Amino acid sequence: MAASENEKEKKIEQHDHHQDEQQHRNKKRKQVFPYGNYRAYYGYRLGQDTEEDPRLKVFKKEWFEGKDCLDIGCNAGIITIQIAKKFCCRSILGVDIDPDRVQDAYWHLQKLMRMKKATKRPGNAPKLEVGESANGSDCSIEGSSNEETKDSPRNCSSEETDLFDIVSFRNEDFVNSRDPPNKHYDTILCLSVTKWIHLNWGDDGLLTLFSKIWRLLRPSHADLGKKLSNSFPSEQGGILVLEPQPWKSYDKNHKVSETTRTNYQNIIFHPQLFQDILLDKIGFRTVEDITSSVSGSKSGFNRPILVFQK
């Protein structure tokens, strides 16, 4: 009888141990981010003490001011919101494959707008630093203090402008989604995204990404081949701001899934070929390398930034 009870207890312990192991494995699986959709991406890219993303210091106002912009792979929306706030876009849409990151992005936008309202009260000038979103991601975004509004180049007349009218976010698998009909953007950002698209969809996915960006960018006078309507008042075509990860970064992340493992082995178009592909195959007219102007990036994030003109 005692032996039977011991066997039951042993089976229960084994079952509990199996459940604990299963829960541990499930927890580990939940922490895998096969698309680079890290929960705390900006927390460790920018750090606790960085008030502004260093890349914004080299971005030109004319790329964004009064322009319709698209941010591919926006993650928690930090740089999307900072661009809208600093450069006064007419509109900027951030898209991300992970619905949780899109939720984080709207959370940060709402928090910033609440803080803007708080600054209008006498004696209040708060600044939003590193906070935790609804999904627990630690991210950093500046609030709008009275001093900042005074010293900055109007920040889209930040006291009057509601960022909800400018900034929006959407959950989208950009590579595999259909182009919106008759939609063009003046500026498209693709910052530290190419590696993840490349690993998940291979060379074909990368070429699809570049081709789709080309189609979505506003045409130039030469592209239209006729007198422009008011829809396209500028002689120049749209621009792509590209920040590709180096090949050594692929090596660190290619084991996140079986798909990425397989694609990694079959990739032909390494990042050093991207510039030639975009100019010679896709059709961009010019490229400007602004990498050397970027300073203040954390170790591991000193990546090239290339600006392509359609």
Image (tube, helix red, strand yellow):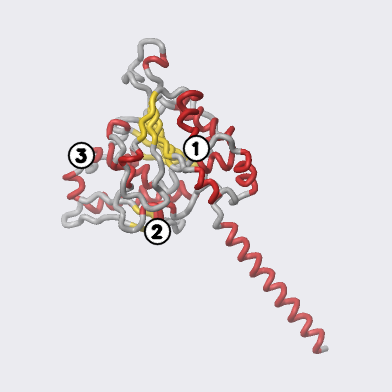
The mark nearer the N terminus, 3 or 2, is: 2
Using the rendered view, name the quadrant where residue 183 is placed: top left
Asked if residue 280 shows in the view, the reply is yes
Front residue of 1/206: it is: 206
Residue at image location 56% in from the left, 54% down from the top: 32
In percent of width and height, residue 35 lies at: 53, 46
| 3D distance between C-alphas at marks 2 and 1 | 34 Å
The secondary element bearing badge 1 is classed as helix
Residue at image location 61% in from the left, 65% down from the top: 24
Q: Residues within 10 Å of mark 1 (few under 14, many from 20)?
A: some
The mark nearer the N terminus, 2 or 1, is: 2
Front residue of 118/100: it is: 100
* Residue at image mark 3: 153
* Residue at image mark 1: 271
On residue 132, the disc is: 2
The secondary element bearing badge 3 is classed as loop
Using the rendered view, name the quadrant where residue 47 is placed: bottom left
In percent of width and height, residue 81 lies at: 35, 44
Discs 3/2, front: 3
